Image (cartoon, rainbow, N blue to C red):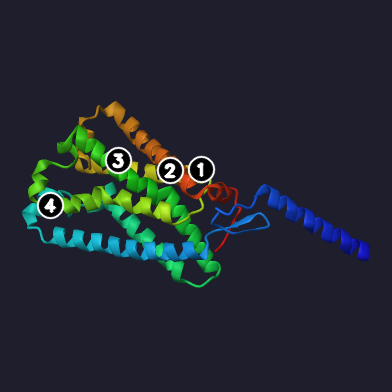
Amino acid sequence: RLLALYNLVIMESEDSQKAENEYPEDEEVTFKKKRGKFSRRTQGEIAIGFVVHVIMLFYWVFVHVYDATIVKGLSADARKAAFPTYEEFFGRWRHLTYINMWSCLVYFFLAFFADIIPRSSAKGLFQNVVDFMFASVVFPLALMVQVTFWGLYAIDREGIHPTRLDGILPPLLNHLWHSLVAVAVLIELLLVFHPFPRTLRVASTQFALSIVYTVLIVYLRQTTGKWVYPFLGKIPPPLIPVFFAGGFVLTLVLFFISKGLAYLRWGERITASIKGEVKED
């Protein structure tokens, strides 16, 4: 029995030494580890994340309140000019800008909720949903909205944001929709650590969402005779599928960009998270 106990101690010592060799100590590393498993966040990072989520939740509530106040304050004619499909099927939900506004609000609410609930299986589930949602939907969609809007704005402003809207909608609202969204998710990426899921899971999710949105856009075109985005009417019909496929590729590229930025910020913790070597807080 003593010999068996001695062998057990020796085996545990070798496992511990192996883990230390695989993940050497570094005073600059700001996360803790135990037996090769990295802690998700330090207590200081948890506090920073909570503050970020509170601020961002208030910010997105303000965006929605300001948006609703401006839109409802318009006269019927002005509202019709600014949002031609306002009272039609799917209304403003046809536009990625509006979908992005709600995805950010829902995300930061879930992130805040995950911060405040006690440790439990439910907290772990919420945290996993938040992490996956940020990497696969929130960050790529926010950047896609900003990149595509300002890119198309530079090429054909009348096809994406006609000059007639300048006298109807305040410039601040346009920047809340299409500029500060990227700032918000970049702050989240740089200040709050999120384990990244495997690329196949992200690509599958983005592909499914792209198909759903493409079907919606095409269905509305067939039923109303109008494209949700006027510039689509200027694209030759054979190239329309190419355009939508390019949108999917862009979201995937933006995911890889977010992953690269996260690695520059958080280092080997990102690699460890993909391998499943990150513990719960």
Q: Amino acid at mark 1?
A: Thr
Identified at 78% across, 58% down, the residue is 12
Q: Earlier in the sequence, mark 1 or mark 2?
A: 1
Q: Amino acid at mark 4?
A: Leu
Q: Is residue 204 above or below residue 99?
A: above
Between the residue at mark 1 and the residue at mark 2, the CA separation in whole angstroms equals: 9 Å
Secondary structure beneath label 2? helix
Up the image or down, 126 lies above or below 157; here it is below
Q: Earlier in the sequence, mark 2 or mark 3?
A: 3
Locate the C terminus and report the quarter of the image it occupies: bottom right
The residue singled out by tag 3 in the image is 147
- Whether label 1 touches label 4, CB < 8 Å: no
Tag shown at residue 169: 4
Packing grade of label 2 (10 A; few <14, some 14-19, many >=20) is many
Q: On the image, numbered disc 2 is attached to which residue?
A: 255
Asked whether, in this view, residue 22 is left or right of residue 185, the answer is right
| Residue holding disc 1 | 199
